[in-house]
Amino acid sequence: KNQVEQSPQSLIILEGKNCTLQCNYTVSPFSNLRWYKQDTGRGPVSLTIMTFSENTKSNGRYTATLDADTKQSSLHITASQLSDSASYICVVSSSGGYQKVTFGTGTKLQVIP
Amino acid sequence: NAGVTQTPKFQVLKTGQSMTLQCAQDMNHNSMYWYRQDPGMGLRLIYYSASEGTTDKGEVPNGYNVSRLNKREFSLRLESAAPSQTSVYFCASSEFRQGRNTEAFFGQGTRLTVV
């Protein structure tokens, strides 16, 4: 069964600090991996997408890495801001169509002043 | 562009009542989806429509029906609501191009409570 596991479940960090969120997956065959940010009461918004051949992708202060051999991804947030407080969801697609998508349960990040 | 618009944003139903959740997108996407999000679980696909005129079941379709009214609109209907359908519902749309899905755009969600 395709699975996406994220850790930690929740995280509290001080404003200005860095943090790294983890994603392990067992989805096969692998097509791509996305990280989404979901603010409270809003729908998810895509941050990055990586395919099998990509091992790092940046979007401003967000940097995602992918190790397709170990089936692990991480999302690194640099110099955190209060607006980074949100849930971050790892989403893995298998080949063949969007319906073959597995969502992780997310990491809830709280940035405090 | 409004993106993906869902209505209503909040709804309370009594067990056994019916209702339709509306979704419209203005990005000319072919594919549209309905998900539910429950605490401690990832988003789960209820139904999807790969293109206008087609609909298919997702992971958790029981108790729901859908209609792809046209390219823009994809509605989700609960015929006889049950407390287990208390959830946050998200509509999304995307394109499928060159063997890959483009980014999915999500609506703001409908928070449904069935009492």
Image (spheres, coloured by chain):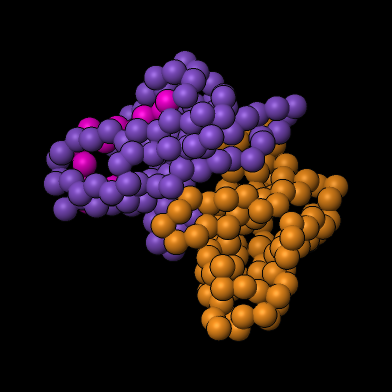
Q: Where residue B70 sits in the image (x, y, percent)? A: 44, 18
Q: How many marks?
A: 0
Q: In the rendered view of the protein, which quadrant contains the C terminus of chain A?
A: bottom right
> As rendered, which of A17 and B17 lies closer to the eye?
A17
Chain A display color: orange
Q: Where residue B32 sits in the image (x, y, percent)? A: 50, 31
Q: Is residue A10 magenta?
A: no
Q: Is residue A14 left or right of residue A71?
A: left
Q: Residue at x 59, y 33 (%)?
A: B94
The image quadrant of residue B34 is top left
Note whether A32 is above or below A97 in the view shown. Answer: below
Q: Residue at x 62, y 30 (%)?
A: B95
Note whether A95 is above or below A26 in the view shown. Answer: above
Q: Where residue B11 sits in the image (x, y, percent)? A: 24, 47
Q: Residue at x 42, y 22 (%)?
A: B68
Chain B display color: purple
Q: Residue at x 20, y 49 (%)?
A: B12
Q: Is residue B29 left or right of residue A17?
A: left
Residue A30 showing in the rendered view: no
> As rendered, which of B87 and A69 lies closer to the eye?
B87
Extent of the magenta region: B73-85
Residue A94 showing in the rendered view: yes
Q: Where residue A89 sits in the image (x, y, percent)? A: 58, 58
The image quadrant of residue A30 is top right
Q: Is residue B74 magenta?
A: yes
Q: Is residue B23 left or right of residue A62?
A: left
Note whether A31 is above or below A88 in the view shown. Answer: above
